[in-house]
Image (spheres, rainbow, N blue to C red):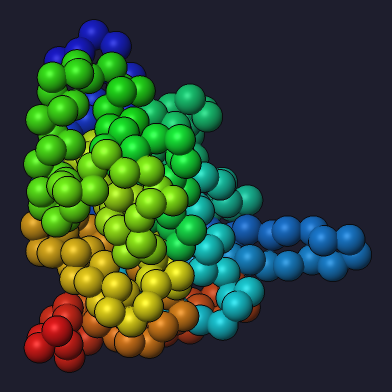
Amino acid sequence: MSNDCNAALGCLVGTRRASPQAMIEVSGVNKTFHLGDSTVHALDNINFGIEQGDYLSVMGPSGSGKSTLLNMLGLLDRPDEGRYLLNGVDTMSLDENERARLRRQQIGFVFQSYHLIPRLTARENIELPLMLAGISAKQRHAEVGVILEKLGISQRAHHLPNQLSGGERQRIAIGRSIVMKPSILLADEPTGNLDSRSGREVTNILEDLNREGITLLVVTHDHNIGDRAKRHIRMVDGAITSDTVHRQAGESNAAD
């Protein structure tokens, strides 16, 4: 065990430990924004749990709190009230450095606009988190090579983002999000900028990752994407109005 392990974090790097408790437990979470004279209840008494390996979609109209919920789960924002446990860690008790460390170790993000660094090649964009973590060049090269092959874009490894299609850019973004072997992948409108074919391909990749054990939560406006999840959460005005379990992931699109 590393000597620099923080007791509050429990040395979570690379672990996906089994536990009788949910992987994520959220209880009594509230988040309010003040916009001029208006008060917006972005999250209103949110209570739910996520088990290891779950595949959820979060849907609802614009302004319903979906992105705020994603930011809270991704430790990018703090709720005003409530409790959020991630793999047994009380995230509300962590300072910003501890939250950042836990986020790097446990959470991957996929965004609608990719957030790739324009001056870096596809390989370098995927490699960046490993570089920041101090992983050796030899190990980085090997691990990124596996990911490029897995995502079917090895031939585009040395291209810059502006030389790639939208679908290829999103594959690179997915590669970057999983290179640190996160426990959970949070995807915010991951197909929003893609045509229908590229959107299906990206969704299939995300579902393959879920089948390999990564917990997957997708925020989307697209019912064709959201309906593929095993579990559907609907939000309206900051509150969860329904939380239902449906068919197996991708069943309705098995022929894709």
Q: Is residue 32 left or right of residue 159?
A: right
Along the viewing direction, whichever of 129 and 161 lies nearer the viewer: 161
Q: Is residue 246 above or below residue 64?
A: below
Q: Residue at x 13, y 19 (%)?
A: 138
Along the viewing direction, whichever of 228 and 137 lies nearer the viewer: 137
Q: Is residue 181 above or below residue 82?
A: above
Quarter of the image holding residue 13?
A: top left
Q: Residue at x 34, y 50 (%)?
A: 173
Residue 245, given in percent of the width and then of the height, sits at 24, 83
Q: Is residue 14 left or right of residue 66?
A: left
Q: Is residue 44 above or below residue 87?
A: below
Residue 112, given in percent of the width and then of the height, sits at 45, 62
Q: In the image as oriented, which residue stretches furthest toward the right?
A: 37
Q: Is residue 75 above or below residue 216?
A: above
Q: Is residue 109 left or right of residue 229?
A: right
Quarter of the image holding residue 238?
A: bottom right
Q: In the image as oriented, which residue stretches furthest toward the top?
A: 3
In which quadrant of the rendered image does the N terminus lie?
top left
Q: Is residue 176 left or right of residue 39?
A: left
Residue 21, given in percent of the width and then of the height, sits at 22, 53
Residue 66, given in percent of the width and then of the height, sits at 51, 69
Residue 23 in view (yes/no): yes
Q: Residue at x 37, y 78 (%)?
A: 195
Q: Residue at x 19, y 64 (%)?
A: 205
In which quadrant of the rendered image does the C terminus lie?
bottom left
Residue 105 in view (yes/no): no
Along the viewing direction, whichever of 21 and 132 lies nearer the viewer: 132
